[in-house]
Image: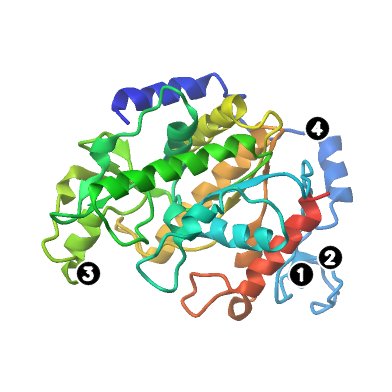
Amino acid sequence: MSEACLRKTADFNSATDHRSPRESPYVATATEAMKNYKVNRAGIWYKDDVEPDDPAGKYAFQRLRHTLFTPKIAAKFTLRRDDKFYAIGSCFARGIEHHLKKLNITVESAAPEFAKLQPAKKQVTGLGFTNKYNTYSILNELRWALHPDAVFPTDSIVPVTNSTWYDPHTNPTLNFTGLEETLERRALMQAVTKRIENCRAVIVTLGLAEVWRDVQAEVFVNSTPLAVAHTLNPNAAPPSFKTEADRYEFHLTGFAENWSNLEAIHALLSEYGHPDVHIVVTVSPVPLMNTFSSMDIVVANTWAKSLLRSVAQEWATAHSNVDYFPSYEIVQSSDRAAIWECDLRHVKGAGLKHITELFLQNYIE
């Protein structure tokens, strides 16, 4: 995607902005605000002389003592079990996808074509190849699949060795292969992504705010370029590894960039997607593996997740067919030992099951 293409995306987006993100997302009269206070059963954190361990307690300091946190969820719309679903985003989207499929819900993004691909490591599946970690990569994938004028930048596919190539708009979970097969995988990715146009239910999971841009191809990529990763860790690089680390630049993205990308995604799905498309946006609780900023990893992760959480809420407020689902809060507010695997990065199966059950209870008719 050229810089001109990037500017075109911004122009395409501007027509869909319902309000500036600098405006207050919600304004109420004093009467309305007091009504909110009175009717919101989950609106108070603490009260004196209340038993902290009451399992039926309504106050946050009581509910946060539950092993798996259950927030108040007021869904803006409902979906049907016979709707076709499409999940796009980080690895957390794959977990939700898996649990929806177990309930015999059609999930077009969990394509059997991907499941047949052989990953390089046994502990992952071929579907991990489809992960999209930032709003740029989600937008790119949707544009290349849906917009008739969008052209995939083949010059962004880079050699790994003399005989293998890498598509930096995918997740590098598969064995590297020759250019022809790499391009076939790219075509498969776009063919499956195009199926989103038949899906009434779209789940978008936001993962990272740290992104990389290919300066030569003039396009943002999906994750840390191999040229950078292998330069930092030469022992992980294959023999005869070709490094071009300087063709990439690192970006700490801000609110405005991510907001613009989400608005462009909404415009694409409105024009080329299902005529009654409904979008549920979530923020992945999975933390950064590392940071390329100068911040402590914990600080960098908090900053990034806070930014994405904020822009997700603004996006949901701006559109009647977009809703925010608090999977991030469910995980962060649950008992650490019960919710996290030992790496404190991946959510246990019981946690994903709890999240999926809450999603179904609140959104599925």
User: Which residue was labeled with disc 2?
Assistant: 58
Q: Secondary structure at mark 4?
A: loop
Q: Are marks 1 and 3 in contact (CB under 8 Å)?
A: no
Name the front one of labels 1 and 4: 1
User: Residue 17: percent from the left, percent from the top?
Assistant: 57, 24
Q: Earlier in the sequence, mark 3 or mark 2?
A: 2
Q: Amino acid at mark 1?
A: Arg
The answer to whether residue 7 is left or right of residue 255 is left
Nearer the camera: disc 3 or disc 2: 3
Which-is-in-front pick, marks 1 and 3? 3
Quadrant holding the N terminus:
top left
The answer to whether residue 333 is visible is no
Q: How many residues crowd around disc 1 within 10 Å: few (fewer than 14), some, or many (20 or more)?
A: many
Does dot 1 land on a helix, a strand or a loop?
A: helix
The three-letter amino acid code for the residue at tag 3 is Ala
Instruction: Assess disc 4: are there few (<14), some (14-19) or many (≥20) residues with their C-alpha within 10 Å of its C-alpha.
Output: few
Name the foreground residue: 171 vs 301. 171
Percent across and percent down for residue 225 are: 27, 52
In the rendering, at what x and y percent does residue 253 appear?
Answer: 39, 43
Residue found 68% across the figure and 64% down from its top: 102
Q: Earlier in the sequence, mark 1 or mark 4?
A: 4
Assess disc 2: are there few (<14), some (14-19) or many (≥20) residues with their C-alpha within 10 Å of its C-alpha. some
Q: Residue 28 is drawn in which quadrant?
A: top right
Residue topped by disc 3: 236
Find residue 282 and report its horizontal and vertical position in percent.
60, 51
* Residue 132 shows in this picture: yes
Identity, as a three-letter code, of the amino acid under mark 4 = Thr
Query: Relative to 185, is 326 on the left or the right?
Result: right
Residue highlighted by disc 1 = 63
**Whole-number angstrom distance, CA of label 2 to CA of label 1:** 7 Å
- The alpha-carbon separation of the residues under discs 3 and 4 comes to 59 Å
